[in-house]
Image (spheres, rainbow, N blue to C red):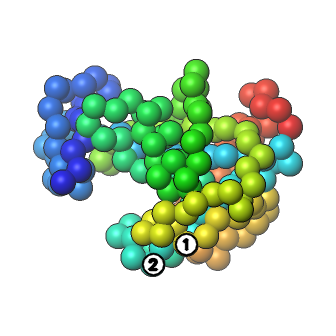
Amino acid sequence: MELVDLYDENRVPLGRTAERYGKKGPGEYRVVVHVCVFDHQGRLLIQQRTPEKILWPGRWDVSIGGGVDAGETSRQAAEREFREELGYPLDLAGSRPFVTVNFPAGFDDFYIAVRDLDLEELTLQKEEVQVVRWATREEVLALAESGAFIPYPKSFLHYLFDTRETFGFPG
């Protein structure tokens, strides 16, 4: 059983935990993380989820995503999830989420990093990830348009690419 810390609507810790997918009470929220890794050419590392996943099976997603376990910080969870799903020790020291999106069950922190990862050096978690690849903005938007990508708003996908270009990341 995976436990998560609970927060109020202002993201103040409530000092309680709950089962990750269990029903939460009114005013109880959890934290989820995503990491968007871009290469220096501006392409986003995307992953295709396995058909066995409960949520969005077989769909493409940003580099990684997952829940924050009880007792973890958002950044610790982002690093752990990256290591678990892709077998790579991504160091996000000094990083904060570039955007937090509210969703009905909680808060979703998105981290952005620029790394020229060699896909051959990644070890995919077979229960979670089918395949990874680099994709341009146009390729990600085409996948979204076809329904093959998790249904983020197209404007949000643009925002992720724009954030990488706007806030001083090396290009």
Identify the image quadrant of residue 147. Answer: bottom right
Residue under pointer 2 = 51
Residue 80 is situated, as x and y percent measured from the top left of the image, at 45, 43
Give the residue drawn at x 35%, y 70%. Answer: 54
| Residue occupying the point 40% across, 44% down | 32
* x and y percentages locating residue 162 in the rendered image: 74, 41
Which residue is more in the foreground, 165 or 52?
52
Q: Which image quadrant for residue 111?
A: top right
Mark 2 residue element: loop
Q: Which mark is residue 130?
A: 1
> Residue 112 bears which disc, if any?
none
Screen quadrant of the N terminus? bottom left
Nearer to me, 49 or 164: 49
Separation (CA) of disc 2 from disc 1: 8 Å
Secondary structure under tag 1 reads strand
Callout 2 touching callout 1 (CB < 8 Å): yes
Examine the rendered structure and indicate whether residue 82 appears above or below residue 94. below
Q: Amino acid at mark 1?
A: Gln
10 Å crowding of disc 2: few (<14), some (14-19), many (20+): some
Q: Is residue 19 above or below residue 129?
A: above
In the image, is 55 to the left or to the right of 115? left
Q: Earlier in the sequence, mark 2 or mark 1?
A: 2
Residue 113: give x, y in percent of width and height. 67, 38
